[in-house]
Image (cartoon, rainbow, N blue to C red):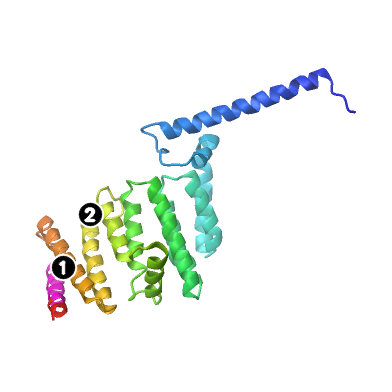
Amino acid sequence: MKKYSLPKLAIIPSIIVFVLSGLFFLQYKIDYLRRSLDSNYTNLDPLEVLPTALLGSFRGVLVDLLWIRGIARHEEKKFYELLAINNMIAKLQPHFSAVWIFQAWNMCYNIAFEWESPENKWRWIKAGLDFAEKGAARNPTNGDLLFEIGYIYFHKFDSKSFKYAGYYREHLKEETGKDNYRQSLYWVRKSLNYNSLLRKRIVIERTVCHILWHASLQAEKDGNRKEAYEYAAESINEWNAYLERHPDDPGGIAGSYLAKINEKMLQLER
C-alpha cells in the first residue's frame, strides 16, 4: 500500500479549501449581479451570469474577436458556423440587442433559405423566432428588438413575399396556437412603449396600420370575410389615430390608404 508523507497529506485539505472558497466567492458574485436592482443581469439565469463573473474585463476582448469571426463567416455564407458564434456572443453579451436581432434574422432568412422543403424552412423560422423572444425576455425594454420580432411575424408570413407563407401560418397556429398577425401587432405595439434607435416612431406607427391592412387582405383571401372586415375596420381606426397625432401626414399616404380600405369594407359588406 502506497504511503503519503505528512506534508503531502496536509496539502490536499488546503487545495480543497482553496477550491471551495473560490466557488463560494464565484457564487456570491453571481448572486450579487442578479440581485442588484440596477443590474443588467436580473433577467438572466445563473449560468448566463457565469461568463461575466469569470471573464471580467476580458469579456469585451473575447466578444470583439467573436464579432470579427462572425462577420467573416457571414461573408463566406457559412451560416451554421455563424449560428454557433452568435449563440456564444449572446451568452457573453446578453443585453446587446444586435446579436439577438442578427441571429434571429440569420435563422429565419439565411438558414431557412438554404433548405428546399417547407418543413425544414419552418423549423428554422420557428427557431429564429424562439431565439428572438428569448432575447426579449432578457431585454424587455429594448424597442428595436421588440419591433424586429413583430416585423418577422409580419413579413415572413406574407404570401406575397414567400411561397410557403401559408404553410408557416398554419404550423404556427397548430404548434403554438398563435396567429402571426396578432403576434406581429403585439410586438410592434409593445415596441412603441420604448425608445428605438433604428426607426422613427412615426414609421412604427405606420407599420401597425400596414399589418392590419395586410391581415384583412389575407383573411379575405382565406375566405373569412368577417375577420377581413374586422381587420379593415381596425386599420381605419389606426390610420385615423395616426392622423390625429400627425395631421401633416409626411409622405401623404394616410389618405390614399383610408380611401382604399373604406372601399374594401364596402365590398365586404355586400
At label 1, counting other C-alpha atoms closer than 10 Å, the crowd grade (few under 14, some 14-19, many 20 or more) is some
Residue 96 in percent (x, y) is at 41, 47
Residue 47 in percent (x, y) is at 52, 41
Q: Which of 72/141 is in front?
A: 141
Identify the disc placed on residue 233: 1
Q: Pick out the residue farthest to the top.
A: 6
Circle nearer the viewer, 2 or 1: 1
Please, what secondary structure does the residue beneath circle 2 have?
helix
Sequence order check, earlier mark of 2 and 1: 2
How many numbered tags mark residues here?
2
Mark 2 in CB contact with mark 1 (< 8 angstroms): no
Q: Quadrant of the C terminus?
A: bottom left
Visible residue check, residue 257: yes
Q: Quadrant of the N terminus?
A: top right
In this rendering, would 13 be left or right of 166?
right
Residue 173 in percent (x, y) is at 37, 66
Please, what secondary structure does the residue beneath circle 1 have?
helix
Amino acid residing under circle 1: Ala
Q: Residue at x 79, y 22 (%)?
A: 8
In this rendering, would 69 be left or right of 99?
right
Magenta part of the protein: which range?
252-265
Q: Which of 122/40 is in front?
A: 122
Visible residue check, residue 250: no
**Mark 2 = which residue?**
201
